[in-house]
Image (spheres, helix red, strand yellow):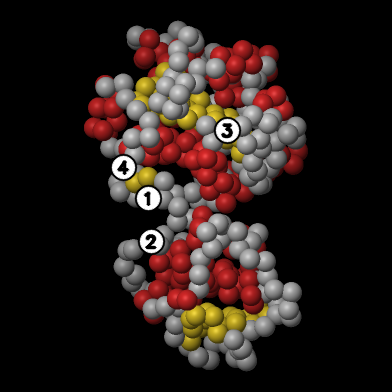
Amino acid sequence: MRPFADVTTSADPGRRNGEFGRSANLSAWAVAPDSRMKPPSSQPPRPATVVVPGPHLMPALLGSRDAHLRAIEDAFPDTDISVRGNEVRISGSASATVARLFEELVLVLQRGEVLDPTVVGRSIRMVEADERPSAILTDDIVRGAKGRAIRPKTAGQKHYIDAIRDHVITFGIGPAGTGKSWLAVAMAVQALQSRSVQRIILTRPAVEAGERLGFLPGDLMAKIDPYLRPLYDALYDMLDVEAVQKLLEKQTVEVAPLAFMRGRTLNNSFIILDEAQNTTPEQMKMFLTRIGFGSKVVITGDTTQVDVPGGRSGLVGLERTLAGIDGLTFVHLGAGDVVRHRIVADIVEAYERRGATPRDPRDTSGTAREGAS
C-alpha cells in the first residue's frame, strides 16, 4: 500500500455522542468462502462498534478530510457514526449494515486494495445488495504490465470471471465499458502464464461501425489491424511491449479476423471472440464448432450495438438456442458494471430507459446473471 500523507482522521471524541452496545472485533471476523454476506438479523437494530486492527489503517479507511466517512454517512442518513481512536461506533436503523461495510472496507485495505471514492461507492452498493466487497475487489486475476493487480471492480465482473473459470464456453453480454473484453484478455493471459493453455487466439468480425472505410493500404494484416486494435490495447495492459511482440512473433498469441477461423480445430487454446453481436448466425455456428480439446472460449458482445448488415446478429437470441448445454453459460452485465467515467453509465441507462437501441429481449440491465450451465 502506498503511504498516507496529509490525511485527517475523525478521532475527536466530541464528534458524535451516543450510547453504544456490543463490540465487533474485526481481527476475529471470519471471511465466508463466497461473496454473499449473511442476511441481517431480524432483531431490532442495536448499536455496534467495529474495532479496526491497527490505527495505521484509519487514515485510508476514513479518507482524506474524512471523505469516505462522509460518503458513508450520506448513504445511510439514519445512522450516526463516531470515530474514537481505532474504534468506529455506529447507531441507528442501519447500524448492522454499516458495521459490515466498515469490516469489509478494512479487509479490502488489508488485502492491498487502495480505497478511493469510487471503490467506497461500489462497496456501499455491494453491501446493500448483501455482497462482500472483500471477496470481489481483491480477487487477483493477473499482474498487469506495470505490476498492478488486475481485479474485478463490480459484483457482475466477479461473477463473469468466475463463470470463465468454471465453464468451457462463456458468453459475456453487456454494454460498453463493463470490461467484457479486457477481463477476458486478463483471464487468457493468466491461463497462458499458468500453462493451462498453449496459446491465445483473439478474433473479431471485420465489420465497420456504420461507415464505409474503403480500401485500406498495406498487406493483409495492415488492412485488418484497425478492427483488432482494441484487443491489442488490452494485451499491452497485461504485458509489456517486448513480451507482446515476442508472443506475436512466436504465434503464441494470434490475432486474426473471424473469417480466418473457418476450417480450423483449435486445441489447447484460450479463444476470445470479441464484438460477437456483429457475427451472422452462420459465422457464430462456424466459430462455435472450431473448439477443440483443452480449450476455453469467451465470447463477448453488446446486443444494443449491432452493425452487421441487415441486423442479422448471430448473438441475438442465441441464449435460447443453446440453453441447457453443459459447460456453457451466459453472463449479462449492465449499467451497474460500467467502470469507465460515470457519465458512460448514465448514458447507458438513458438509452435503456428510452429503448432507443435494439436489444435481446432476454438481456437484463444493472445486474449480472448466469444462464445455462
Q: Which residue is mark 4?
A: 145
Q: Amino acid at mark 1?
A: Ala
Residue 203, x across and y down, in percent: 46, 22
| Residue 309 percent across, percent down from the top left | 64, 14
Residue 121, quarter of the rendered image: bottom right
Badge number at residue 327: 3
Tag 1 and tag 2, C-beta contact below 8 Å = yes
Residue 98 x %, y %? 60, 73
Q: Helix, strand or loop at disc 3?
A: loop
CA–CA distance between discs 1 and 4? 9 Å
Please identify, in this view, whether the residue under mark 3 or under mark 2 is nearer the observer.
3
Is label 1 in contact with label 4 (beta carbons under 8 Å)?
A: no
Q: Which kind of residue does numbered mark 3 sit on?
A: Gly
First in sequence: mark 3 vs mark 2:
2
The quarter of the rendered structure image containing the C terminus is: top right
Residue corresponding to mark 2: 112
Residue under label 1: 149
